[in-house]
Image (cartoon, rainbow, N blue to C red):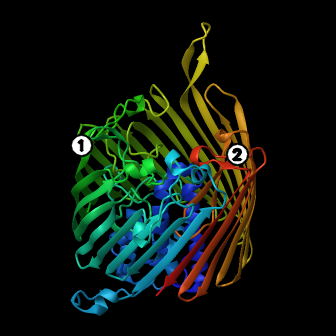
Amino acid sequence: MICGVVPEVAYSQDSTSVEEQLEKAFEELDPEESGLTGEQLTQFLEDLAADPININRGKLDDLLQIPGINLKIARAIVDYRSTKPFETKEELLEVSGIGPATYRRMQPYVAIGGSGERFRDMYLRPEYWLANRRVEVFSRYQRDLQESEGYIRPDSLGGYLGSPMKYYHRIRMNTNHLSVNFTQEKDAGEPLDGVKGFDFNSGHIALVDNGKLNELVVGDYSLSFGQGLVLWSGGAFGKGREVVGTISKNERGIKPYSSAQETDFFRGIAASYGDKIELTGFYSERPRTASVTGIDTTRFPTSTGFHRTENELDRKNNIYQMTTGGRLRVDSRLGLIGVTGYYNRFSSYIDKGSLLSSAFDYEGREHSVFGVDYRGLISNSFLFGEFARSENGGFGGIVGVETPIGVNTELALAYRHYEKDFQSFLASGFGEQSSGPQNEEGFYVGLRHILNPKIILSGYFDQYQFNAPRFGTSQPTGGFDVLALSEINFNRSLNVYFLVRSETRDDEYVVLNEMGNEQILMGEETRSSIRTNFEYQVSPDVRLRSRVELVRNREAGGEWETGFLIYQDLRVEPTRRLRIDGRVTLFDTESFNTRVYQFESDLLYVMSNTVLYDQGQRAYVALRYNAADFMDVWFKYGVTVFEDRQTISSGLNETKGNVRNSIGLQVRLLF
């Protein structure tokens, strides 16, 4: 999905691989859980593919950005190139720990280049700052074609103030040592009054890879350290089809921010300096939006970023959040060891609310978190972990190991323990819940085995426990999640996989007792699915994909319900400049509880994981056209037809009729 940056032959293969990895990462997740981080992870991978890491010159931290690479593999690459430089990407297969599956995952993000050192004495010369300059200008337009209740209802009655158009544009310049960006976005329903009237504006100026000054960002940035228990923004891989290599995190440190996700970033100044010993410091102060509960008292800031109605606009930017902190990391013979901490202050008092599930949430104005993390090697095993403590005394920790067992088998183990009063709301640790690491204890086992050159078997088992009530319950609960995957590569053209997943968790339900009074009981909620996926490369220009999926769900105290999905996918590349993706999907579910998901091709940087329920059909066509060496165009049209309803959604999103369709158009200029 990156035109004009790499040769066209490699372009198609690499963009497809990026899309496949995003699909593996997100297709098993509820779109509401993946929405906040999906866009940022999508942009991170697409940008990495557009500007791949030079495996002959990349520093250890650069190599650790590549999906599929952990500390063990990164060190092996450095050792290999110390004897002779890589001449082809395929030579990576000669590096210890890199097999065909790992190579396929990392291949879009690496490049071959010379091993000579860059000059560091040219800081005053324009050529230094403008080397490998790439200027990107693009605009995106999206909208639903049906008019929902929010656009019909008057403003005075809570209707939307703006048009149904969603608009986003960005100007960005990247060089080897400099990044400059300006982003603006208007969500559907938000008002727009001229160029200055966008609801969201973001920008930065960043110095990158200048001697020992690794990063210096003024403006908007993201922070990702350790295993995510103290500070982590920007998205990360989690549980999914990649059962080994995703439970551990490779920190990204400071990254200039250019996404349109409106809440998961910092605004101010940040810098990192050093090599074997790296020191990072940051200061951020930015407005947030929160519901007002009293004089100088609000709820915790919202994460939606929507300001479409008069009530939403009245709350916009009504509090300020200041965050400052730092990190020290040492690259030693024992591995990478880091210490991270921050202090946070809100301009108003944060009220945690009265729900049972909020009993241990953060409340107050000031807050701090401190943590220690490590990544190291013992023989062929990669070990990782982080331990953190919040200001109120709550503790969070995760430890894990990834190791080969035998020639063709890899094992991943991880134990996590996040106390119910561990308050780390700027974090994103591995776990079952999509929110911050809190109120969870779990043990994960992942296994991948190469049965033969054509068959790979993998799976995981994850047992977890919530030691305090979570949302919707009044007592501690627990559960387990199981996934089994069989991938069969019959030949270079035909690939088939079979996926089985089942999750069972405790949940409460209400019954009437003999006296006619409501009584709360504890039961088990189970959701299971089985999927068969066929992918056939008919020719270099034509790819077919077929999928059949069956879902069964039983709510606590309820009966089994069934959902079904079948789709046929077609990808055609009639020329090197044009790619067309099309799909027709049939779905039939008994209720929302048996909903089905499908990952869809979409515009660049757009993460589309569509949820389907009830009975109907969905179809879409997505085009990517390299109109010229300096211009790319994307277009998508999608339509969903429901067979058993005449009203779609509810509230302000309610739409009359049984058809819902949408369009998207994006143009990018590259210089």
Residue 660, image x, y percentages: 69, 56
Label 2 sits on residue: 647
- Horizontal arrangement in the rendering, residue 310 relative to residue 515 (left or right): left
Looking at the image, residue 356 lies above or below residue 81: above
Residue 473 seen anywhere in this rendered image of the structure: yes
Depth order, front residue of 256/112: 256
Residue lying furthest right in this view?
643
Horizontal placement of 652 versus 432: left or right? right
Q: Residue at x 60, y 32 (%)?
A: 525
Q: Which mark is residue 365?
A: 1
| Residue 54 visible in the picture | no
Determine which quarter of the picture holds residue 355: top left
Amino acid residing under circle 2? Thr
**In this rendering, would 54 be left or right of 152?**
left
Residue type at numbered disc 1: Arg
**Picture coordinates of residue 375 (x, y %)?**
33, 57
